[in-house]
Image (spheres, helix red, strand yellow):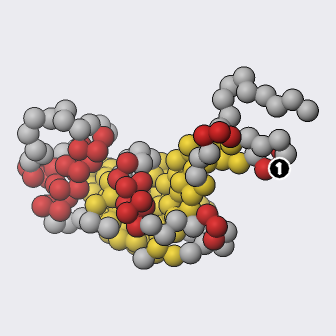
Amino acid sequence: MVTAIRYNQRTCMNERKINDFLSKAQTVFLGLVDQTTPYVIPLNFVWDQECFFFHGAAEGRKIDIIHKNPNACFTISENYGTMVNPIPAKTDTAYMSVMAEGRIEVVTDLDEATAAMQAMLNKYVPGYYHSSLSKAHVEKYQSSLGSKTVVHKIKPIHITAKESKLDEQKKYQPGRTIRN
């Protein structure tokens, strides 16, 4: 499922590393197309069973766009620091990023929706709740604005992953300078 990228020296093909990254990353940027205008939204998400899950209100601009065009892109990126070099053009950033494309679908199965929401709780607030999320709670939950909450998923058509590993010896720290 992982495909190569143009700058192939930075391609990460290690699926275990990619899965680990996706299970820990905190924010995904969901890219949609509203007719001819890009629309990108930061979201909490969970990577589970090789699918991305997210939730939100059952109405609003995002939902309107998804109904018209369910094609989407997910982008996740984590910055691990800047690496300096005596040659300014060789200063670089350590990072990992993943991009995935697919079609968004509403999770209609209550068991699957509950499992996705429980996985989100386990990721973002591990150990906070003493009991598992009930299906009744997921079925009846409403947003702070009164809209029903809906769970969506994307099964990626393909994924690209890119990384630049951190060289601790080159990592920039405030106050670090170079003498010419």
Q: Please state if 172 lies on the left or on the right of 155 as rendered.
A: right
Query: Which residue is farthest front?
Result: 169
* Above-or-below relation of 3 to 15: below
Judge by depth and name the residue closer to the eye, 8 or 5. 8
Q: Point out the image quarter for the N terminus.
A: bottom left
Please tell me which residue is depicted at 19% across the width and 45% down the height of the picture.
141
The residue depicted at 36 percent of the width and 67 percent of the height is 154
Can residue 73 be seen here? The reply is no
Q: Is residue 14 above or below residue 128?
A: below
Question: What percent of the width, then of the height, locates residue 153?
Answer: 32, 64
Residue 25: where, in percent of width, then height? 42, 48
Q: Residue at x 9, y 47 (%)?
A: 134
* Neighbour tally class for label 1: few under 14, some 14-19, many 20 plus, Cα within 10 Å: few
Q: Which residue lies at the image location 15% right of the left edge and 35% below the top edge?
A: 129
Q: Secondary structure at mark 1?
A: helix
Q: Amino acid at mark 1?
A: Ala
Corner quadrant of residue 108: bottom left
The residue under label 1 is: 89
